[in-house]
Image (tube, rainbow, N blue to C red):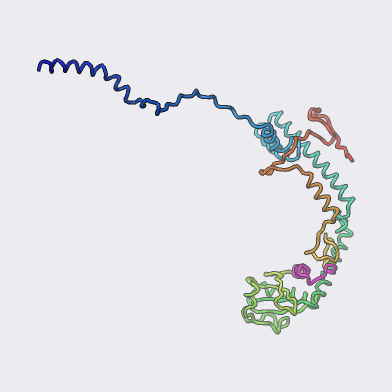
Amino acid sequence: MVLKWLLIPAMVAVGAMLAPHAIAQIDRRPHGWIWYTPTPQPSRPVKQTTSEPGTEAAAKLAGPSQWSTAWIREKLPRLRDLAIQDPSEKNVRAYLLLQHLAMDRAQRFAEVSMMVTQGDPTLDENTRFPLASAAAQAGVESAKQGLVSAIQVLAKTTGLYFFFSSTCEYCHADLPVLRTFELESGMKIVGVSLDGQPIDNQLFPNYLINSDQAQRLGVQYTPAFFLVHPPNLSDVVQIGQGYLSLQQLEQRIVEEAYYHGWLSPATYRETRIASPLYQAGVSPRDQHTLSSKDAALITSVVGSLPPRDHNGRTLGTPTSYSGLDGASPNADPQESHVPQMTE
């Protein structure tokens, strides 16, 4: 019994000595040849990535080339806004100098355009219609006569549907126009009443009453005019819905008839104040207004344009400054330069 009480303090003392070692073993991994503890590796510095040689160059080429037209178009309004917001001498002068350069280029373009136009009858509008007032009036009178002649030609093969309502004030207003048109052209006009009531017993004594013609043709307003080409009565072309003057009626009839192949190109040409761009005798559907030589020229110039990226920005080497007189950007901006025409 005495031995028991002597052993208790000894065991407590031994436990106190072993407790720190036991606690330290709780969070440690088991040791042995089957347990591998990786050796911690020293942290490596993050390597700074550098762009490839071509990447930085491509980024610089993404915008318009300096002094190019696109570059001026982009910078000029920004310089203007800056000069208005902060009108210092430097800001205002920079804007005015760039504006002066843009105006010089515009003047050069206008001068070259004038020379190219006057030297090419294909581009010179004076060949299509005289610019002088004395000859212009003669052209207008000739076109009016040609329009009447074309209508008379069409009257032999086509007719006109006139959809009306007896209560439509615009239908009544168009009756004098239709009388004049009938006398000048001789074209047969067929009146179709939407409400079953007459509108003019002298002009349309034998009018038709609408059954489903207006619905099939899509009549929404009166008066409504349709050009028909017998013997195929389903071959109908809308001329217009609503009031039409005599000139509008005749002009639309000729244009629609020509477009649908009911009027020859030669006859249609006589109705135009300005000669059409297409070649005489060729249908507008088959007409290519450019000659093979001109088309090749456009293709060649378009092929020489620098490529663009997916954002539409031009890719190419920056161009150096070139004024109309060949002045460098370091030249005295106050010096007056006269644009010179070069070959």
Q: Is 124 displayed left or right of 27 in the figure?
A: right
Farthest-out residue, bottom = 206
Q: Is residue 123 above or below residue 57?
A: below
Question: Considering depth in this image, is 301 or 99 the residue closer to the camera?
Answer: 301
Q: Is 239 displayed left or right of 300 in the figure?
A: left
Query: Which quadrant does the N terminus fall into?
Result: top left
Residue in view at x 55 percent, y 27 percent: 46
Where residue 64 sits in the image (x, y, percent)? Answer: 72, 38
Query: Which quadrant does the C terminus fall into?
Result: top right
Residue range of the region highlighted in magenta in the rendering: 247-267
Q: Is residue 262 above or below residue 113?
A: below
Q: Is 77 contained in the magenta span? A: no
Residue in view at x 77 percent, y 70 percent: 257
Where residue 307 sits in the image (x, y, percent)? Answer: 73, 43
Where residue 68 sits in the image (x, y, percent)? Answer: 76, 38
Q: Is 152 displayed left or right of 307 in the figure?
A: right
Q: Is 249 contained in the magenta span? A: yes
Chief secondary structure of the magenta portion: helix
The quarter of the picture where residue 143 lies is: bottom right
